[in-house]
Amino acid sequence: MSTKVRSVLKNSGIAFGILGIATAFCFLVQRISESDTHVPLLFVLAVLFVSRFTDGYVYGIVASIIAVFGVNYVFTFPYFKLNFAITGYPLTFVAMLAVACSVSALTTQIKKQEQMRLEVEREKMRANLLRAVSHDIRTPLTAIVGSASGIIDNYDALSKENILELLEDMKSEGQWLVRMVENLLSITRIGDGTARINKEDELVEDVISGAITKFRKRFPDIEVVPKVPEDVLFVPMDAILIEQVIFNLLENAVLHAEGMTKLALKVFVLGKQVVFEVSDNGCGIEKERLNGIFNGSYHLFEGRTPSSDSKKHNSGIGLSVCQTIVKAHDGAITAENNPVGGAVFRFSLNIEEMKESE
């Protein structure tokens, strides 16, 4: 089903739903008060709500026309007959039409302003990501070029062990660049917020297993303690993208949680959502940086002695990718410090697909 068809069905449902509620309420009040004076006012309010909660002008104008004819046919004597000779009838029609047009115009303007605000935020995020990427890509490329030049210029003077060490450094930097490209490709798949995620019902245990397997290849010496629900749990998601989120959160803990000795991955159900939680017992996150931790606008460990890996790769690009992916899944992601020490990252996904995205 196309986006345009979904929009028409959604707006039509809202319009007819509001008019139906107004009609039922009029019948109810009519039975109680035995008066019709309230009917025009209730339908004017109904037209106002239709104009407010639908897109564009069409639905409000159509609702005003339906309301005028409905009031005339159902609630005006002689009942269930159209009578255009009623005193004040043109005024009621004009009033409803004016309400519909004015409220629709105001709502359209508000939505345009909101769209402009969101576009400014997206541009700001793109700028932050570009700044972070430019910094982080330059560093490993410089290291690779330096190691390669060292081998070429001093090949005869270097021992086999020295050459292997330089090649290992080049391999490590190359692997990091591959992960950076994977993150950027993840953002590209999502696009500017208009592209839709291809969600399938995925077994949560399989997604967790895939992310941990990928993580252990990168950090074989780091133990992750996973905890998943005993019941079989399927969640609509893009498995590749969510694996990327989990991997990024685990990697972030390894690179930035100074003093960490324990890394845990927990999954649990909360209401109609499934929550993924990555926690560590490291140094935690400075409070003033928690609010902007996912926008990539600063380095997580600025002013702090980072690990050897995070000295080279310390931007928030991975966390920015996490936020982009989770938001594209209609989910939410948060970060906070654990009262007993360390940091906790959580993101939640809907267990059942939202109707608008079906």
Image (tube, helix red, strand yellow):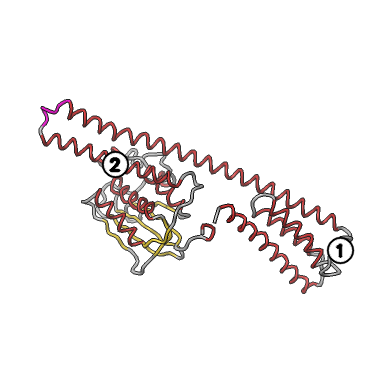
In the displayed structure image, the side of residue 325 where residue 210 appears, left or right: left
Q: What element does badge 2 sit on?
A: helix
First of labels 1, 2 by sequence position: 1
Residue 100 in picture, x, y percent from top left: 73, 52
Q: Amino acid at mark 2?
A: Trp
Q: Toward the viewer: 155 or 246? A: 155
Where is residue 74, by image quadrant? bottom right
Tell me the crowding category of disc 2: few under 14, some 14 to 19, or many 20 or more residues within 10 angstroms, Cα based. Answer: some
* Left or right of residue 60: residue 292: left
Quarter occupied by residue 205: bottom left
In space, the residues marked 1 and 2 are separated at their CA atoms by 77 Å
Q: Position of residue 164 (x, y in %)?
A: 15, 37
Amino acid residing under circle 1 = Asn
Secondary structure type for disc 1:
loop
The residue shown at (69%, 46%) is 105
Q: Mark 1–mark 2 contact, CB under 8 Å? A: no
Image: 31 above or below 7:
below
Q: Residue furthest front?
A: 1
Res. 83 mark: 1
Q: Position of residue 72 (x, y in %)?
A: 82, 63
Label number found at residue 176: 2
Q: Which residues are magenta?
A: 153-158
Frontmost residue, 6 versus 78: 6
